[in-house]
Image (tube, helix red, strand yellow):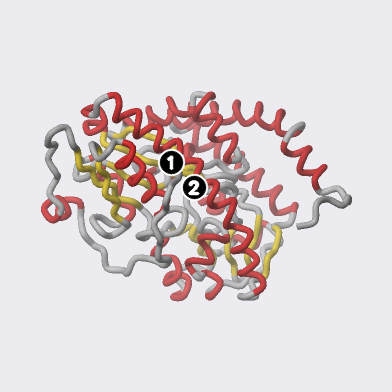
């Protein structure tokens, strides 16, 4: 299948989207099922048409619509068009809309275990995460987590390994997190908080303004492809790597359970296959686009690219272990999810050491290869 992507416009949705789910229900009345044709709406946490994230949701809606020959038609709405970004789960759970697209750690205030599904500090890479969902029991665990929010879960994109973040001071030791006001979500945010920072969770559309106003003085978003589109280089000097906090981040397609249960089996299969395709397409887009964007940030915008020192990473890893242990001990479902991740990560590391990691070292040896 040849997928034709729609042209997208970069940038965040203009502010002021204060609509609530209840108000949205009257503005966007729920469509009826007619002649076995369903019209669904998908709300996202992403700015409209934002590269990789918003456009990934667009591809999902388009695929479902075309694969079903219009029997299940999905219209996609960006953050703020029906509800604000972080109200997307509420809108889907209560049936205001049928589908949503975001990231699992956005819902940790509803079900703690959701954040482990998104990413774990020093955890699994994208290939390992996908294998965990498909063959390691991850899908079944995620379904149990999302059932508590009245939703069906699908992995629906992955950012791959993210960047470590944007800072206006050098980050040399763990003490440099003291007093920092940083936007960083999920479990990575819990680790940074334990290291002494104040953590602020903001949706993408608010990040640049928050950095400009001083509401935050450090932030992470995704990686070069998205960070260039947002223009973060305008408000921060140092760009650190690697993204220890999000070695790969799952995006989620969540569907109202009642709406899901009403679908016939063939439409359920279409939704599942479409998500499987989008999960790989989004990851592929980030792999394809990140390096060119990084070179633009460095060469055109004079961004100072820095690696986190090993000493700092070691301390962050130690704190991560303590934080994850403390958090999971307080919640049985989180503990079950984390234990599954720990077990699968161990197996994946053992194989990765003699496969991808060993090959990466071999590829970097000083020999001549094909010249482009």
Residue at which label 2 appears: 282
Q: Position of residue 211 (x, y in %)?
A: 48, 71
Residue nearest the viewer, comparing 294 with 187: 294
Residue displayed at 75% across by 52% down: 310
**Around disc 2, counting alpha carbons within 10 Å, would you say few (fewer than 14), some (14 to 19), or many (20 or more)?**
many
Q: Earlier in the sequence, mark 2 or mark 1?
A: 1
Q: Compared to 309, does 326 lie above or below? A: above
Q: Is residue 136 left or right of residue 242?
A: left
Q: Is residue 183 left or right of residue 107?
A: right
Q: Give the number of the disc on residue 156.
A: 1
Residue nearest the viewer, comparing 128 with 49: 49
Residue displayed at 62% across by 69% down: 296
Residue displayed at 14% across by 50% down: 25
Residue nearest the viewer, comparing 357 with 91: 357
**In terms of image quadrants, where is residue 149?**
top left
Q: Is residue 158 left or right of residue 361?
A: left
Q: Compared to 56, does 303 lie above or below? A: below
Q: Compared to 169, does 247 lie above or below? A: above
Q: Helix, strand, or loop for circle 1? A: strand
Tell me the distance, in whole angstroms, between the alpha carbons under discs 2 and 1.
Answer: 8 Å
Q: Compared to 137, does 292 lie above or below? A: below
């Amino acid at each position: 299948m040849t997928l034709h992507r729609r042209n997208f416009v970069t940038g965040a949705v203009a502010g002021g989207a204060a609509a609530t789910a209840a108000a949205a229900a009257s503005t966007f009345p729920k469509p009826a099922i007619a002649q076995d044709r369903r019209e669904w709406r998908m709300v996202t946490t992403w700015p409209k048409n934002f590269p990789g994230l918003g456009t990934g949701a667009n591809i999902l809606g388009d695929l479902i619509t075309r694969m079903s020959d219009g029997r299940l038609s999905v219209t996609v709405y960006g953050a703020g068009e029906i509800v604000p970004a972080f109200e997307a789960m509420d809108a889907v759970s209560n049936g205001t809309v049928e589908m949503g697209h975001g990231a699992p750690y956005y819902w940790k205030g509803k079900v703690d275990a959701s954040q482990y599904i998104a990413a774990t500090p020093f955890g699994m890479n994208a290939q390992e995460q996908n294998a965990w969902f498909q063959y390691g029991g991850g899908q079944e665990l995620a379904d149990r987590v999302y059932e508590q929010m009245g939703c069906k879960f699908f992995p629906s994109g992955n950012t791959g390994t993210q960047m470590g973040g944007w800072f206006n001071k050098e980050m040399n030791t763990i003490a440099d997190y003291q007093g920092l006001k940083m936007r960083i979500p999920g479990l990575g945010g819990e680790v940074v908080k334990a290291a002494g920072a104040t953590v602020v969770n903001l949706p993408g559309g608010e990040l640049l303004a928050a950095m400009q106003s001083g509401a935050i003085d450090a932030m992470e978003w995704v990686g070069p492809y998205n960070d260039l589109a947002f223009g973060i280089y305008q408000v921060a000097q140092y760009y650190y790597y690697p993204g220890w906090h999000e070695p790969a981040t799952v995006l989620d397609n969540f569907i109202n359970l009642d709406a899901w249960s009403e679908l016939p089996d063939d439409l359920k299969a279409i939704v599942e296959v479409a998500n499987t395709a989008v999960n790989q397409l989004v990851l592929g887009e980030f792999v394809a686009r990140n390096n060119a964007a990084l070179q633009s940030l460095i060469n055109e915008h004079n961004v100072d690219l820095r690696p986190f020192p090993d000493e700092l990473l070691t301390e962050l890893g130690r704190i991560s272990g303590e934080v994850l242990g403390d958090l999971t001990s307080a919640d049985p479902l989180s503990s079950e999810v984390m234990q599954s991740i720990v077990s699968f990560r161990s197996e994946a590391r053992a194989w990765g050491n003699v496969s991808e990691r060993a090959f990466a070292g071999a590829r970097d040896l000083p020999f001549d290869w094909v010249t482009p």
